[in-house]
Image (cartoon, grey):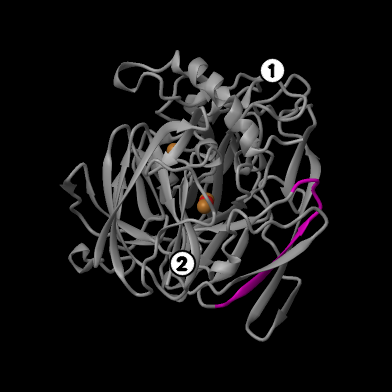
Amino acid sequence: MSPTRRDVLRLAGLGAVAAGASGCGLLAGTPQPQLLVSAAPLPNPYAVPLPVPEVAEPVRNEGAVDYYELDERAAEAEILPGLRTPIWGYGGTFPGPTIEARSGRPIVVKLVNRLGEPTVLHLHGGHTPAESDGHPTDLVAPGAAREYAFPLRQRAATLWYHDHRMDHTGPQVWRGLAGMFLVRDEEEAELPLPTGERDLPLLICDRSFAADGTLLYPGLAGRPGVREAYMGGVLGDVILVNGAPWPELRVARARYRLRLCNASNARAYELATGGPMIQIGTDGGLLAAPRTVERIRLAPGERADVVVDFSAYALGRRVELRNLAAEGAQGRVMRFAVDREEADDSAVPGRLSTVEALDPGKAVVTRDFEFSSGGLHGGTGWLINGRPFEPGRMEARPKLGDVEVWRLTSDVAHPVHLHLDQFQVVSVNGERRTGPPEWKDTVELRDAQTVEIVTRFTDYRGRYVLHCHNLEHEDMAMMAAFEVV
Ligand code: C2O
Ligand code: CU
């Protein structure tokens, strides 16, 4: 039995005390993400080949609409070599199949819930009508099914889909309910970017395992740990890429497009290869022009599209993708082994796309959203503007077509995600963001920051949410509903 929010909150006072012990300075007492230590022996890094999730096939086409079916079911996976791990998976796999769709070509996904718990499907980064957006209370009961319509009137981008059930997203995603979703378009198809097996989705997340291979999560039935002690966020000690621990991929001396997606509950990464990476895209699709970076920070929910040119390395070289935000095993992610010569006619052109700059001067209103921990029913929870999530209470009613600036402030780090439309970052701590505009749907607020974003509410009226994408914060009420009118 999963605890209800009320159970969780009743126990929360205890957790705040326990977690506060690890806090420091001004933020003492504010729960921080906690490492959940595996009891299973951890495999050697780079011993397992990188799996690539299957691409989902539509079950039928009607006119210009592709129909997919996603069955959510319990299954077993060999994640740690030699051990069986029970998972929940879309199509019985973790990650679920990758959905590849085209901009402007609608798809319908029928979600069939064969699990024992209610679920909700959300397409993260999708520009989706409210009734298909996976509002956290639009539950699909065990045994039931529901069709989600995704018109995909949006740019090519690396999206992902995952469970979004109110109060339970953390454990349900942790058990495996996540997959990649690529939107392609004509503009992108004209570019000479790497394609085929050199266009790779990499879904990165951390997990912890019991001695028998079972996934550990605080408060999951029969598992040790109190969920409330982990209200700051659950960190796993095994880093998985496409569901495999610290995998290795053999690559040719050629360019590869890596679609990096941080699907972790609470872990932020600083990804680096030790050499240059050419970033070509963000959450909301291609940049106007590529930029060379040495590292990429990705908070939970964020994506980055990069091209790595392995022809810069000699045959036999091994290139680690490391996480500079952690030490030891969690500082490793995966490895590329450069093992062959292959022809490569790909390139990264100097101009990739047109990115409109949204002018914050056009905003009709500036709204404030303060993300902080706070007292809740005698315990501690995560609040927005001092209030816990109430699905029926609208924190804002933006008008369709309006440009608005939302000013987000934090106590501790919160990766903030907006549904419906992509946004642009205007300023961080009052300092105006310079440089070419880029589209985002998730932005990380670091400790005690103020980030202003500008967005425009387009195409669809109805109820959506803004929330923290640290899934434990989200489940402890750090969410606000708004209605586009
Ligand atoms: Cu990726 Cu509202 O979530
Ligand atoms: Cu948060």
Q: Identify the residue position indicated by label 1 in the image.
A: 41
Judge left or right: residue 131 versus residue 94.
left
Question: Which residue is painted at 67% across and 38% down in the image?
Answer: 4
Query: Which residue is pictured at 48% across the width and 50% down the height?
Result: 258
Residue shown at 54% from the left, 52% from the top: 200
Relative horizontal placement of residue 419, taking residue 363 as reference (left or right): right
Give residue 156's mark: 2
Q: Is residue 137 above or below residue 26?
A: below
Q: Who's the residue at 61% across and 19% down the image?
A: 37
In the image, residue 413 sits, relative to residue 259, either above or below, namely above
Q: Position of residue 14 (x, y in %)?
A: 55, 19
Confirm or reject: label 1 Cβ below 8 Å from ligand 1.
no
Q: Nearer the viewer, residue 467 or 205?
A: 467
Q: Between marks 1 and 2, how big is the CA–CA gap?
A: 41 Å
- In x, y percent, where is residue 185? 48, 72
Front residue of 94/129: it is: 129
Task: Inspect the image, locate mark 1, and give the three-letter code of the amino acid beneath it.
Answer: Pro
Q: Which image quadrant for residue 180?
A: bottom right
The region drawn magenta spans 105-117
Category of crowding for the residue at label 2, using alpha-carbon neighbours closer than 10 angstroms: few (below 14), some (14–19), many (at least 20): many
Secondary structure state at the residue bearing disc 2: loop
Q: Decide: is 477 above or below 356.
A: above
Does the segment drawn in magenta span residue 277?
no
